[in-house]
Amino acid sequence: MPTLSEVARHAGVTPATVSNVLRNRGRVGAQTRQRVLDAVDALGYRPHLAARALAEGRAPTLALMVSSIANPFYPEFALAVERAARTSGHFVIICNTNEDPQTGRAYLDQIAGTLSEGVLVTNANLDFADLHTTEARGTPVVLCMWERPNEPPGLPCVAVDFRLAGELAGAHLLALGHRRIGAIVGSKASGIHAARYQGFVDALHAAGAPKSPVKHALDTIQGGYDATRALLEADPKLTAIFATNDLPALGAMHAAADLGLHVPDDLSVIGITDIQLARESRPALTTVAVPTVEVAELAVSLLRELIESSYGQAGRGAANVPMRISSPPELVVRASTGAPRPR
Amino acid sequence: MPTLSEVARHAGVTPATVSNVLRNRGRVGAQTRQRVLDAVDALGYRPHLAARALAEGRAPTLALMVSSIANPFYPEFALAVERAARTSGHFVIICNTNEDPQTGRAYLDQIAGTLSEGVLVTNANLDFADLHTTEARGTPVVLCMWERPNEPPGLPCVAVDFRLAGELAGAHLLALGHRRIGAIVGSKASGIHAARYQGFVDALHAAGAPKSPVKHALDTIQGGYDATRALLEADPKLTAIFATNDLPALGAMHAAADLGLHVPDDLSVIGITDIQLARESRPALTTVAVPTVEVAELAVSLLRELIESSYGQAGRGAANVPMRISSPPELVVRASTGAPRPR
């Protein structure tokens, strides 16, 4: 592979001039510039990204920490992150923590500041202390899907008003006439879906509707399936299921099918997020859409700002931790919700 | 961040000794070794992967080229690749070509040999000439899911007998008594699913069954949905659908539901691959399983061998291009296939 020096020799200039041309830096005359580009073409020279980044004291990738790429939300989000990162010439390394804080710590120790100059975190079940340590070592960290804009996490983040998402879902079911609604929460009571569930409870409370039975479940199709069977066994007169995520909502539709219940006539089902499967299921799933692509772009641009401003190197107060808030979630009505039909 | 020299000073040894301890190289006494490890702990030293790799003339990641990570097969495969790569200390950069050879070429130009010391390719719609160029520059390339073991591609590969997968699917439907079977091929006639379709045709031919109507479709749920509607419109007496991939098979089940056809009583459906959704659909999808995890492990281990043997640097004949063949695909019978019921 040809080196920068060989390109310089071929063009009859100094290596510094070649570097300036390739980086659009310094002053180089048009003729010299053309000579350099011709030499680059002739020799098939490719700039050595990793070497260049190291020479500049930079790492050439962004790390994206996710809890499990087998959950279809993460590939969709990773794709959006990758697209946004490419505009700044960054490659993205996807780090699966498999819901294990120790795996996450190993990734942070090995990648942050060496291979990656910034870290994006999405529900990766990481210890905040580890993230603060990473930040203190000079590698900026951005949380990508913070669920409570009014309770800043103490780390830079992109926040989505997930409480509102739950409220919109609840209000939609109430407006259709549902009063007996089962709730499925895809996390522990104090877990990441707590804000979504709170919004749903707020909607019921505002409408004077009775309290809903609630099941905490795995954030999977199977988790939603099992929770729906349990909820309907305890109260066969439920006319709707609210799930805090699309995967358990899809599981609720599977449970309805196995029980011979028609969706939405016998049972309405609503989720949150709007993953691709929500559009592709039969019936198509009504859900509250989260602006995934916008969140990815906000997260990458915030991380780039922090990298360029050497955030984390200097001391700062908690008040100066940046937070970007995405557009609000929006109700997307499809075929899985309708007016209740008494059974 | 502490440097290797600081660790050496702290431990009272030379930097070379620290390096030897951390890499399990050279001879270092047990006491010295412990002093070094204590110093590493005390200072929080982390080896600089990128710098170390460059110093050794190596790049610290593997690149995985995929056509679109939004297709759920790729995240499942990427997860398996990542797990296999971590055992050799490699990180994986996932490169989405979005089915565009130019995007693929840009990735190869920027990553191969600099950031990544090897490239894994899975149906990324890349130009073979670009892959040969990458290889000729000294960066090994492995094709991960070559579909025709008896027609080597001229590049190192892991091959899966996909013709057999199609034959097993066809034989299963025939054994259940189906004779009017619609076929959906998720690629062009000469495309990557041609071997799977050939196996299906072989099974019909061996059983003396009539030729099947066939539709070439997009390799998506929607593609399978549209193709099934078209096949059933042309011949409403079809009793089964064979699809060359699970996504279009799932679309076939959606089409059946919309047409009021019960799966499998009115219409049996079978796919190929066994992605997670196949297990989670209702009814669960009968499919021919491809050994995804095994293929990922074979591909990573072959790529590591090529990296370590400096494959591609030396001249070689076509006969010496290595190919690994995975275990054969296996029929997985679930709820979407059964004996035909005349309509």
Image (tube, coloured by chain):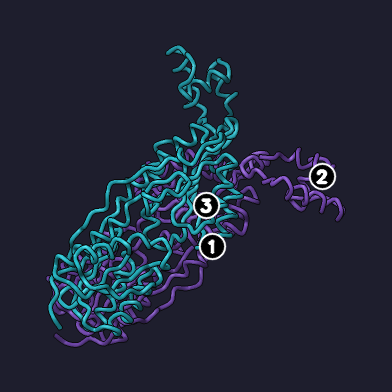
Chain colours: A cyan, B purple
| Residue name at image x 20 percent, y 70 percent | A209
Task: Out of A318 and A85, give the one closest to the viewer.
Answer: A318
Q: CA distance from mark 2 to mark 1?
A: 33 Å
Chain of residue at mark 1:
A
Q: Splitting the image into 4 quarters, where does residue B71 fall?
A: bottom left
B15, A312: nearer the viewer? A312
Q: Position of residue B201 (x, y in %)?
A: 30, 73
Residue A39: mark in rendering: none
Residue B243 or residue A271, whichever sits in front: A271
Residue A93 in percent (x, y) is at 49, 49
Tag 3 subunit: B
Q: Which residue is mark 2?
A: B11
Q: Is residue B132 something that shows in the picture?
A: no
Q: Which mark lies nearer to you, 3 or 2?
A: 2
Characterize the local packing of mark 1: few (<14), some (14-19) or many (20 or more) Cα atoms within 10 angstroms. some
User: Which marked residue is nearer to the observer: mark 1 or mark 3?
Assistant: 1
Numbered disc 3: secondary structure = strand
Circle 2: is it few (<14), some (14-19), or many (20+) Cα within 10 Å?
many
Residue at image position (55%, 55%) is B321
Residue appearing at x 50%, y 31% in the figure: A44
Q: What residue is shown with label 3?
A: B92
The amino acid sitting under disc 2 is: Ala
| Amino acid type for the residue under numbered disc 3 | Val
Is B233 placed left or right of B127 in the picture?
left
- The spot of residue A86 in percent (x, y) is 41, 40
Q: In this figure, which residue is indicated by the disc labeled 1?
A: A100
**At label 1, which amino acid type do we have?**
Asp
